Amino acid sequence: MKNKSSLKILVVSILTLSMFLGCVGEDETGLKPYQDPNLPVEGRVKDLLKRMTLDEKIGQMWQASPDLVRTYNNFDEEKARKLVIGYGVGSFLSIVGEDTQKLQKIAVEETRLGIPILFGIDAIHGHALYNGSTIFPMPLALSSSWNPGLIEKTASATAKEVASTGVKWTFSPILDVARDPRWGRIIEGFGEDPYLVSQLGAAKVRGYQGSDLSSQDSILACGKHLAAYSETTGGRDYSPADISERTLMEMFLPPFKEAVNVGVGSIMTSFNEINGVPSTANTDLVRNILKDEWEFDGLVVSDYASVRMLYDTHYVAEDLEDAARCAVEAGVDMEMVSEAYMEHLERLVIDGVVPEKLIDDATGRILKTKFLLGLFENPYGSLDPSVINSRQHRNLALEAAEQSIVLLKNEGILPLKDARSIAVIGPLADDPSNQLGGWTGDQPAENVVTVLDGIKNNAPQRTKVRYSKGCDVLGEFDNIKKATRIARRSDVAIVVVGELENMSSEPNCRVSLNLPGNQGELVRAIHHTGTPVVVVLINGRPLTINWIAENIPAVVEAWFPGQEGGNAVAELLFGKINPSGKLTMTFPKSVGQIPLHYNHYPQKNWDHGKYGKRYVDIEDEPLFPFGYGLSYTKFDYGNLKIIPSKIDKKGEIRISLDVKNVGKIRGDETVQLYLNDVVSSVTTPSKELKGFKKITLNSGEKKNVKFTLTPNELSLVDRSMEWVVEPGIFEVMIGSSSEDLRLKGSFEIIE
Ligand code: NOJ
């Protein structure tokens, strides 16, 4: 046993250390250290944790459902008190506006420690669940812009709108690399390529979070869904991902790693399992890789009730208590909606099953996030309605839509020149609610510019615009005859077809990628009138529009283009803008070809970018490849320089080339750089995107484009599952799409 004087020294030094870390006592103003904004966040977290009971800590680890504070859809003060004071709930899902203020007041003024609540909402393309907000194109659409700067701007506009309704957290961006167009959630993400998803995902994180999380205009981003949620079975949402460790590392983890690198504040675990282990119970993935290896110091939230799913869906937990144990051990800090933590964590800790240090780690991360967001100093935010759907944000929504649209085919009919009469036809030509895409609440129809509106707004004076719906997307309505009549009387027919909003997003998947309902028949009938046709697609996934691609002279992919979509489509039709979008997902010709993505591994009859012939009933080629999209002008590529031609594994390669606009009008080109690690210890895709730059060129203008390749872009996962750069030749391919490669060269990595 230690003698008295050494005990005294120990006590004094602990006290000194505690004071230093700001853990005990109050300052002269009566502020407790955790309340003092001038102390470092780490010290404030430590101080607050020390003051909390186990119960209070566990309360922080729960994100409650909005239903729990509502009766008949109205805010219920009594229920709110019970939850906030009685349970000390740390977060609420999907509560906005006035109700956030009421809940926050209870938390700040009536709870023992006054810990503010963190409100979270899905705001994936604008604050779209909030009535009247600005609705940007859906993320898959926006990814077609290949413009990280633009995406960052839309995210920061979204952050402003979200924060102005009392909410400081959004469950976005989706970082799932999506390779199966049947899966309904591909519209929520940035397409099939891990490099592109990483770059665009990082841009979105920067946009939401800004340079200072505590600023009025910043919100916390959440990278989701860790991991491989998009690698479905049969395209079905929530299905298992049966993938190798290699595929996980090469394909699905890089966007999350990049998000962590740029400081994403939270990560959500996915509903699915990977090789038998549900992500919400996956210690290796969450605790070992995300938190330890990548040193992620933000908070991990489960997906909606995915803790409960461990026992009632995946059956890897005996009961709800066991589910709580699995999730907290795996490193899930906050449970969304289900109540396993709330009901069982305390007992698990008291019984010694779950060490309290895991609770401290989880609660500490949540508190740290709240401190960083400035919630202790400014718990209410500012309810400022003037930012919602402001003129500036509407202009940005238009710019975003303009850059998201992809021109798939043009046999010279676009831009429209002398059309004095235009027939606007199709079930989606004038349907505001089906133009916005999923994760959208009720929105005022007058905020949405449909394609019909856009054509009326942008058509030259005295152009006669006639409209007929023609048929439903799905359903009985059939007025194809009337549609053909107005087509016959017009110089051109714009036929707007596609998918309903609820045919994609969670959990809406499809077995067919054909145009639903009678829309194919409608397009054919209009084509048979002899009037030239432009098909405009409004939809949430690549479609097998083989007949249209072959027979219709112009095809425009508008995706779900958001509230300004109609103006953007019309500007493109009339040549007021020059199309610049490029596909971020391969369009297959048949569902039977899936999976079909450009970055496949070399294989017999399908090597080095050349498609072979293996199906007896269809070609191997896609309908439209990754990176593809037409412009009204043409670009020449030349003068490729790769310096140096040899370098060691740690070196950097500088690549430059010239691009010239050789057409008659100004246009944007997305220059794409693909690499092939020619011979390596393991197989690597025949081409992988490793750089891209979007540039604007006036007619006749030439610009020099530069890329730098670092070991990051050159590394592969070797046989011992390590990321390494291997010596050997790398082939460089640069062009306008993954299939239209204009310049080739190489360099060598030496030991
Ligand atoms: C379930 C979805 O998978 C997730 O993306 C979303 O953020 C949560 N629900 C909350 O709405």
Image (spheres, helix red, strand yellow):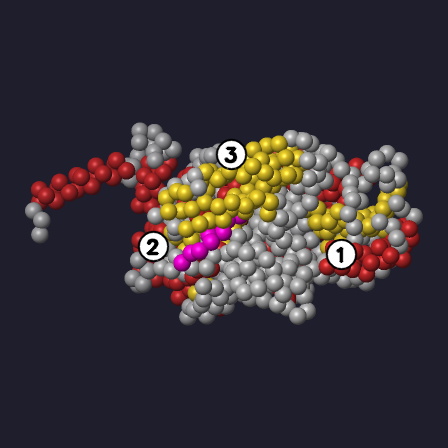
x 60%, y 36%: residue: 659
Residue bearing mark 3: 216
Which three-letter amino acid code belongs to the residue tagged 2? Answer: Leu
x 46%, y 52%: residue: 677
Which three-letter amino acid code belongs to the residue tagged 1? Answer: Glu
Residue bearing mark 1: 550
Q: Is label 2 or label 1 in front?
A: 1
Residue furthest left in the image: 3
Neighbour tally class for label 1: few under 14, some 14-19, many 20 plus, Cα within 10 Å: few
Whether the magenta-drawn stretch holds residue 465 is answered as no
Measured from the top left, where is residue 598 in percent x and y? 57, 55
- As rendered, which of 466 and 374 lies closer to the eye? 466
x 34%, y 29%: residue: 29
Boundaries of the magenta span:
674-681
The mark nearer the N terminus, 3 or 1, is 3
Q: CA distance from mark 3 to mark 1?
A: 52 Å
